[in-house]
Amino acid sequence: MDWSDFILRIFCFFLTGPGIGGNVFVFVKHMCMFVKSPEKKSIDLILTHLAFTNSVTLCTTGNVYATSALLLQNFLGNVGCKTVIFLGRVARGLSICTTCLLSVFQAIIISPTTPTWTKLKLWITKHIVPCLLLFWICNSLISSNLLYYITTINNTSRSGAIYTQGYCCMLPSKLVVKWVFLTLMALRDIIFQSLMGWSSGYMAFRLYKHHQHILYLQRTRFTKINKTSPEIRATQSVLILMSSFLFFYWADFIFSLCIGSFFTNNSIIKNGKMFLELSYATLSPFVLMHRVAHLANCWSTL
């Protein structure tokens, strides 16, 4: 391992510390609000789950990278590698699903007050827990192949080990198995990112309509209106969070494609992918801490 490789890994190691701290703060804060204040159960539950999944990502993926970055002895073992990589992959899928749920929920909340939209608001508010449980089941099944094919590098001398993450590697699988799980992952990502695209487009449209309404009021009343409603500020917060997720997701996808197709042993590409895997989980709690009051005000009645 050269010095540039070592420095980048150390940087990613120190990236996990603030990320875990921020996510723990968001988790504890909204868990307490969930228990004490029934008025904001919907938002508190979603944000608690998002902070928890981000924490799992940092504690698993970050732990694997940190072990190899500091040149520590591999203490995970075979079972540890399977568990850590599996939980990290499940947490990544849950992050996609939870961010999508947050985005769709916000799009529904700012929708017009019509009988149809009102029924949908009530329905989705009552079905948050079943949605989260379904996310866990689906992502666990999609990642179940890792429990068989992931092993520690100490347990294999095969040159066929195709993907390494710290001291853990993935053994080659049958072509049918590989494509079945890749297809399931692709379907999950396509479905949830399509929902994100719809909700972000709808929220952007509602923001544009609100902006036009403000301009109209300014022209008719000859006054400057600076106050923005909690719903608009909450929508802006969700859009920032979702945009950050999509940026890091697609950048990570491109790096993964490069690793799998062209630059299998390129340390710069691998370390760039490592940085991207940890960045969203580190960034999101600070976005939430900065603007979470707007979300709470917006959803205080749900």
Image: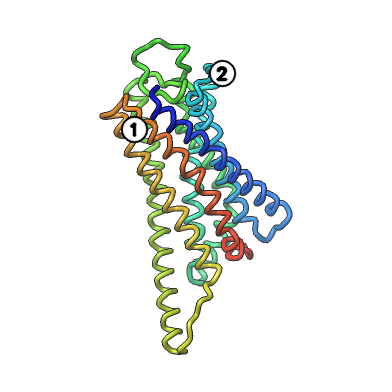
Residue 137 visible in image: no
Say the numbered circle drawn on residue 4. none
Q: Say which residue appears at 41% left-offset and 63% top-offset.
A: 202
Q: Is residue 58 above or below residue 112?
A: above
Q: Position of residue 233 (x, y in %)?
A: 51, 65
Badge 1 crowding class, 10 Å Cα cut-off, few under 14, some 14 to 19, many 20 or more, is some
Considering every residue shown, the one lying at the far top of the view is 157
Q: In 3D space, how far apart are the residues under numbered discs 1 and 2 (Cα atoms)?
A: 26 Å
Kind of residue indicated by mark 1: Ile
Say the numbered circle drawn on residue 269. 1
Q: Nearer the viewer, residue 212 or 12?
A: 12
Q: Quadrant of residue 253?
A: top left
- Residue ID for mark 2: 75
Q: Say which residue appears at 55% left-offset and 54% top-offset.
A: 288
Q: Is residue 60 above or below residue 133?
A: above
Q: Nearer the viewer, residue 151 or 76?
A: 76
Q: Nearer the viewer, residue 207 or 94?
A: 207
Q: Say which residue appears at 31% left-offset and 34% top-offset.
A: 257
- Decide if residue 157 is on the left or right side of residue 120: left
